[in-house]
Amino acid sequence: MKKAGDRQVRTLELSISREMTGRRVLHLLRGELGLSATLVKSLKWREGAILLNGAAVTVDVRVQEGDVLTVNVSDLPAAAVIDESVPLPQVLWEDEDLLIINKPSGMAVHAAPLTGGDVTVEQTVARYLGGGQFHPVNRLDRGVSGVMVVAKSGYTHARAMALLHTDAFRREYRAICRGVPSPAVGEVTLPIGRDTTSAVKRKIDPTGQPSHTVYEVLSVHGGNALLRLRPLTGRTHQLRLHMAALGHPLLGDWLYGREHPALPRRVALHSYELWLTHPVSGEALHITAPLPGEMKELL
């Protein structure tokens, strides 16, 4: 495991084959290495970011068979000023490209007017990685806990974002709702739009964005149900709003239901499980974040 403040360097290497001979470095960066135009533009002006046989080159250089093209796609370091007393959320999995954490409830992903001066996931990750840009692949509401994926470079982030809402990036949540949905297994396909009466709320809106949730009742406890939820789209507050629209708001949901005394600063919603095809290596990952204690107690 890396130490806080030790930045890892992400480099890509391409051995030039006979078929690639005569092509410009630019074409190989955009084609074989799959870099975005924005990233290539930034690398062009970064000293030592693009090397051919160990020597810095411009993107207009043409390659020969046997050459080795090396590209440093790591983010540039950036200062991070945060409260040193707040630890990074639990690390569930990590390599040179990805950091997968168990986000606690009550911690916002980004700083915003409503978060005040509270420490955010962005700040703790920046400190842990020694600075650099923040690249969350999936975001969780402040009151939601569980599996959250962060890319360590813009290169990895772009590749990971292309996997969202496909079988290569499949997420399941656990939630506790008021009452018991019927049927016990079903789908919600209600479109979601902004609620113009609030800065944060969303609403079911026929003119809104298509939204699709699959749910299943796993068990019943004192008139409330433990659910398995799978979002097939990624709209803001989708799971919370869809369950409320069915008449079964999630416990503790102060926006679409009502607060719960046993759930301060959180909703009974937890990002429980992730199946991920690694965006760089292709490795099949299966990550689980155990159900938090306050939700267990409700059951």
Image (tube, helix red, strand yellow):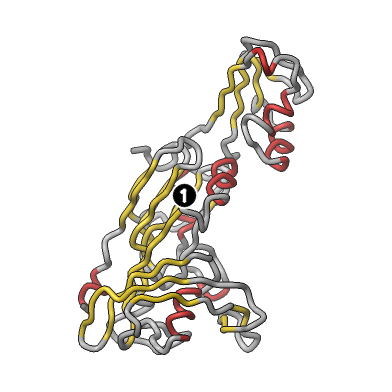
Please give left or right for residue 261 compared with residue 56 in the image.
left
- Can residue 283 be seen here? The reply is yes
The part of the image, by quadrant, that contains residue 25 is top right
Identified at 37% across, 39% down, the residue is 3
Task: List x then y, in percent, for residue 56.
Answer: 69, 19
Pointer 1 local density, CA inside 10 Å: few below 14, some 14–19, many at least 20: some
The percent coordinates of residue 188 (x first, y second) are 47, 77
- Quadrant in which residue 55 is drawn: top right
Position of 282 with respect to 197 (left or right) is left
Camera-side residue of 168 and 37: 168
Give residue 73's position: percent from left, percent from top. 59, 34
- The residue type indicated by label 1 comes to Ala
Q: Is residue 59 left or right of residue 127?
A: right
Can residue 266 be seen at all in this image of the molecule? no
Kindly identify which residue carries mark 1.
168
Q: Residue at x 53, y 47 (%)?
A: 160
Task: Please provide percent x and percent y for residue 247.
Answer: 41, 89
Query: From what the image shows, is residue 251 above or below residue 57?
Result: below
